[in-house]
């Protein structure tokens, strides 16, 4: 159960950041009325974030850096659940030491962003588009709609004319699903063609990072 929660937390953390600050973090429940918050509000008012090839290249590098950070974090937090369950003074001392890994995460994120030349707005904006594009493409592969459509079309060709007509609606529906995953019409309407096309040029790298992140948080990364 704990491993599943860590995977979920990693997926969310890997996608983007919270508001920018001195170390990339802020106290919960405190509204940031500084320049970073104002910039985020202005960006939201301007519409969807525009992904450029240059920013996307920087984001891919940022992802790779954060893979190392999260890999170290997961290792540092292994066994903390058992320490909590133990509840002894020695265990709690070890627990406090382990939590320093969490405290270092925000600083590492800020350093990775600075190294990549990205702001929090950049990271969150790009992550939103990347998540939509890669998630949709990956879902299409997982569901194997294209393969199922091919099988359905082959079956339709072998049927008598009257039965082909009965199957036509199902074939058309499946074809529409395939085109939706391939052409990303809904995602394009939300984020624009330019941003989606930019993400697709790095689809292989982004998918590789995503799969590597899964291995990090499931403990299967070598």
Image: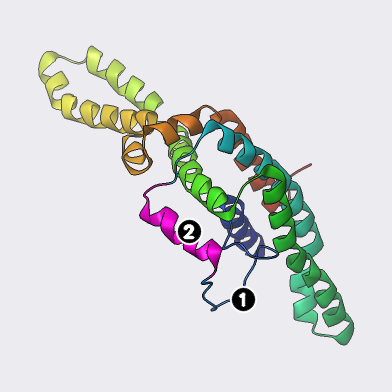
Seen in the picture, residue 69 relative to 174 is either above or below; the reply is below
Q: In which image quadrant can residue 177 be found?
A: top left
- Earlier residue among tags 2 and 1: 1
Q: Is residue 220 visible?
A: no
Q: Is residue 121 left or right of residue 214?
A: left
Q: Is residue 189 visible?
A: yes
Q: Residue furthest right?
A: 90
Say the numbered circle drawn on residue 194.
none
Residue picked out by circle 2? 40
Seen in the picture, residue 15 relative to 36 is either above or below; the reply is above
Quadrant of the frame with the C terminus? top right
What's the colour scheme?
Answer: rainbow
Q: Residues within 10 Å of mark 2 (few under 14, many from 20)?
A: some
Q: Which element type, helix, strand or loop, lies under badge 2?
A: helix
Q: Residue at x 75, y 44 (%)?
A: 221
Q: In which image quadrant can residue 196 be found?
A: top left
Q: What x and y, as percent, mark residue 142?
A: 47, 36
**What span is colored magenta in the figure?**
34-48
Separation of marks 2 and 1 at Cα, in angstroms: 18 Å
Q: Which element type, helix, strand or loop, lies under badge 1?
A: loop
Residue picked out by circle 1? 27
Q: Is residue 198 left or right of residue 27?
A: left
Q: What x and y, as percent, mark residue 75?
A: 80, 57
């Amino acid at each position: 159960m704990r491993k599943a929660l860590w995977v979920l937390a990693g997926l969310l953390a890997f996608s983007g950041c919270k508001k920018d600050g001195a170390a990339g973090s802020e106290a919960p429940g405190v509204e940031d009325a500084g320049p970073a918050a104002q910039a985020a509000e202005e960006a939201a008012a301007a519409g969807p974030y525009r992904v450029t090839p240059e920013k996307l290249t920087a984001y891919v590098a940022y992802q790779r850096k954060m893979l190392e950070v999260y890999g170290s974090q997961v290792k540092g937090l292994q066994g903390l659940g058992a320490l909590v369950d133990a509840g002894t003074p020695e265990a709690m001392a070890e627990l406090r030491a382990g939590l320093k890994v969490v405290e270092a995460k925000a600083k590492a994120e800020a350093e990775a962003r600075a190294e990549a030349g990205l702001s929090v707005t950049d990271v969150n904006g790009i992550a939103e588009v990347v998540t939509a594009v890669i998630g949709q493409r990956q879902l299409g592969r997982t569901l194997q709609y294209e393969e199922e459509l091919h099988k359905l079309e082959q079956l339709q060709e072998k049927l008598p004319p009257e039965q082909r007509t009965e199957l036509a609606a199902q074939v058309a529906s499946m074809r529409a699903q395939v085109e939706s995953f391939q052409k990303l019409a809904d995602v394009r309407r939300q984020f624009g063609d330019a941003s989606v096309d930019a993400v697709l040029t790095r689809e292989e790298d982004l998918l590789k990072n995503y799969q590597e992140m899964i291995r990090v948080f499931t403990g299967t990364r070598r």
